[in-house]
């Protein structure tokens, strides 16, 4: 038995035999052709390009239908490269000038591109090498007539193990019986992670060498929630996870019936359950899970799907789609929250030494006003179509909030001058996710219409723990007594100021904390759609009076371990199936 720890990028547990995907490499010999054969090679090359473009078009259509246009847009880069003349002409030049075969010329040109991307300093651009590799494989497949392992022919569920997967390989998984994905490479923001998460396939990435540690048909336990992969588990481990797998399936079946029932405590207090989404197509899924609106609409994917900055129209179309999908329910749109390892670093002349404390989120927007105003204008345009709210992230001072509101005012003036309708009294709120905002909450509450507590960053910055750093991630815990007191104080201040408040961090979707949060006053939870059934189950099993007693006791403990053990025990009392 071997246990590998990686990054859990898509939650869930699965047990299945492994299918190890070798790199789809073609043995392309250095081959030259006669002058008489050059026209035929050029014709082969043209046919290869045409077939690749047709395949990509078909793939994009299927992806858009199944997972939405934003996921399908991952292939825009591939389509753009293949549809432009430059790449074809470079390859054709090698055929006509050096008499290379079409396949060898393709390999030479695209390997050159891959080397250039690999040598780039910027991480975002270096990751493009996977896309170039994908383009090369597609062209060679059409030129050489070979195909890789046909996963779609496998009739039993399997865990796919690979060093890395190209976007095309991941997209095609929807046509297979794959039940889990384990990869050496990849991380939370990789294309592969985004797509498998959208498909609901449990996945662990960043495992470094799992593809060399696993043989075909090895039994694999994949725990996407904990980021674990167990290779060739012993009998005890296997039994433990089979019980867990059955529990999850049984739980899911039991919770389906709660979908249309209200989130009301046993003493008849109504709780509002909202969801966090990333892509417009997710809005429909939210309602199917029983959500009553969107508490956090992340807009970063608009920037990450392409190297080009999204236009105002692209922003507007995305927001319009979500608003239309949820009807009269509220939609809270968080303005650009990029930074650290993503888009903003690619725009910087030099990478920041400590980007998580650097130019990110609202700070980045306030230094890139054209980009910020483009998004704000689009939100304002969409505001007349439904119950839309604007939320600024990572606010750490009154000055930042006021500057953001001034830019919003400028965007309103732009629309007024253009005669474009918008809602002037659109509610404006902030995410409370820095200790500075928490400690200055009274002053901030005077200038906003609502707040949402972003526990992920609030805990990270309060405890000074990078939760993505596996060396210290164990120190990151929502049970820390200081965190609990901070949350209580924020909610008390909002209650006294008469300002609506909600929570949209991961803590809101963790069942162990539901009683505590109800007890310190939370009445609006926003979480991943998949978390709603469990949270609703606890809410419907609890009374506020009980929750208040639980919260009071939890706040009296000195250590996070005492808090966690106590909250787990109390949750089991009202829901014995809770683990």
Image (cartoon, grey):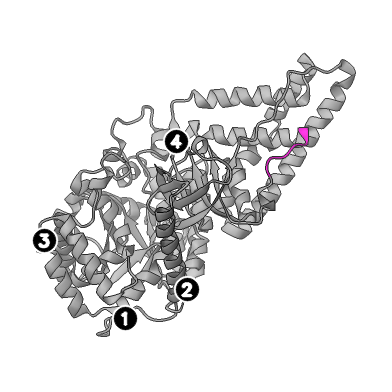
Element type where label 2 sits in the image: helix
In the displayed structure image, the side of residue 270 where residue 25 appears, left or right: right
Residue 208's disc is 4
Q: At x 53% / y 27%, what residue is drawn?
A: 117
Q: From this view, report whether residue 248 is shown above or below residue 178.
A: below
Element type where label 3 sits in the image: loop
Question: Does label 4 or label 3 sit earlier along the sequence?
Answer: 4
Q: At x 14% / y 62%, what residue is drawn?
A: 489
In the displayed structure image, the side of residue 217 where residue 531 appears, left or right: left
Tell whether label 2 touches label 1 (CB within 8 Å).
no
Residue where numbered disc 2 is placed: 253
Tell whether label 4 touches label 2 (CB within 8 Å).
no
Name the residue nearer the viewer: 1 or 445: 1
Magenta-colored span:
144-149
The Cα–Cα distance between marks 1 and 2, rounded to whole angstroms, is 21 Å
**Labels 3, 1: front one:** 3
> How many callouts does the rendering have?
4
Where in the figure is residue 27, as x and y percent of width and height? 70, 26
Residue 526, quarter of the rendered image: bottom left
Element type where label 1 sits in the image: loop
């Amino acid at each position: 038995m071997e246990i590998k720890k990686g990054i859990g990028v898509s939650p869930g547990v699965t047990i299945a035999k492994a299918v190890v995907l070798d790199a789809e490499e073609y043995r392309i010999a250095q081959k030259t052709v006669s002058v008489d054969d050059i026209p035929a090679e050029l014709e082969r090359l043209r046919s290869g390009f045409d077939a690749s473009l047709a395949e990509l078009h078909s793939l994009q259509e299927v992806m858009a239908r199944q997972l939405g246009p934003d996921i399908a847009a991952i292939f825009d880069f591939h389509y753009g490269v293949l549809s432009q003349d430059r790449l074809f002409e470079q390859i054709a030049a090698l055929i006509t000038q050096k008499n290379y075969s079409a396949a060898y010329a393709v390999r030479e040109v695209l390997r050159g591109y891959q080397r250039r991307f690999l040598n780039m300093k910027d991480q975002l651009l270096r990751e493009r090498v996977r896309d170039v590799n994908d383009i090369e494989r597609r062209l060679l497949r059409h030129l050489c007539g070979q195909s890789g392992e046909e996963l779609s022919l496998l009739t039993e569920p399997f865990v796919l193990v690979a060093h890395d997967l190209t976007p095309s390989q991941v997209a095609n998984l929807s046509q297979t019986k794959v039940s889990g994905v384990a990869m050496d490479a990849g991380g939370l923001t990789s294309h592969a992670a985004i797509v498998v998460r959208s498909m609901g396939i449990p996945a662990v990435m960043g495992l470094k060498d799992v593809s060399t540690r696993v043989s075909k048909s090895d039994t694999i336990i994949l725990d996407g929630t904990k980021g674990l992969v167990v290779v060739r588990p012993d009998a005890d481990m296997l039994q433990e996870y089979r019980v867990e797998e059955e529990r999850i399936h049984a739980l899911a079946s039991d919770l389906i019936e709660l979908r249309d029932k209200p989130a009301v405590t046993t003493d008849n207090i109504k709780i509002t359950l909202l969801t966090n989404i990333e892509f417009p197509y997710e809005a429909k899924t939210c309602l199917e899970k029983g959500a009553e609106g969107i508490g956090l609409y992340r807009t970063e994917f608009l920037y990450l799907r392409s190297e080009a900055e999204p236009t105002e129209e692209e922003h507007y179309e995305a927001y319009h789609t979500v608003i239309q999908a949820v009807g009269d329910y509220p939609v809270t749109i968080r303005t650009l929250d990029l930074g650290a390892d993503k888009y903003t670093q690619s725009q910087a002349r030099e990478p920041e030494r400590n980007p998580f404390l650097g130019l990110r989120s609202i700070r980045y927007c306030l230094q890139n006003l054209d980009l910020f105003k483009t998004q704000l204008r689009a939100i304002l345009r969409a505001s007349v179509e439904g119950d839309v709210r604007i939320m600024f992230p990572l606010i750490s001072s009154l000055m930042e909030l006021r500057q953001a509101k001034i830019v919003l005012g400028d965007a309103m003036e732009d629309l007024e001058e253009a005669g474009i309708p918008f809602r002037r009294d659109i509610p404006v709120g902030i995410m409370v996710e820095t200790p500075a905002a928490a400690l200055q909450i009274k002053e901030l509450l005077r200038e906003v219409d609502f707040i949402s507590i972003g526990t992920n960053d609030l805990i990270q910055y309060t405890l000074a723990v990078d939760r993505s750093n596996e060396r210290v991630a164990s120190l990151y815990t929502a049970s820390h007594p200081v965190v609990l007191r901070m949350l209580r104080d924020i909610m008390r201040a909002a209650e006294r100021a008469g300002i609506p408040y909600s929570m949209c961090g991961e803590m809101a979707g963790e069942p162990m904390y539901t009683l505590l949060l109800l007890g310190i006053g939370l009445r609006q939870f926003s979480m991943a759609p998949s978390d709603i059934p469990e949270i609703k189950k606890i809410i419907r099993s609890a009374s506020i009076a009980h929750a208040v007693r639980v919260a009071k006791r939890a706040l009296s403990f000195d250590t996070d371990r005492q808090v966690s053990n106590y909250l787990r025990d109390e949750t089991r009392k009202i829901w014995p199936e809770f683990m």
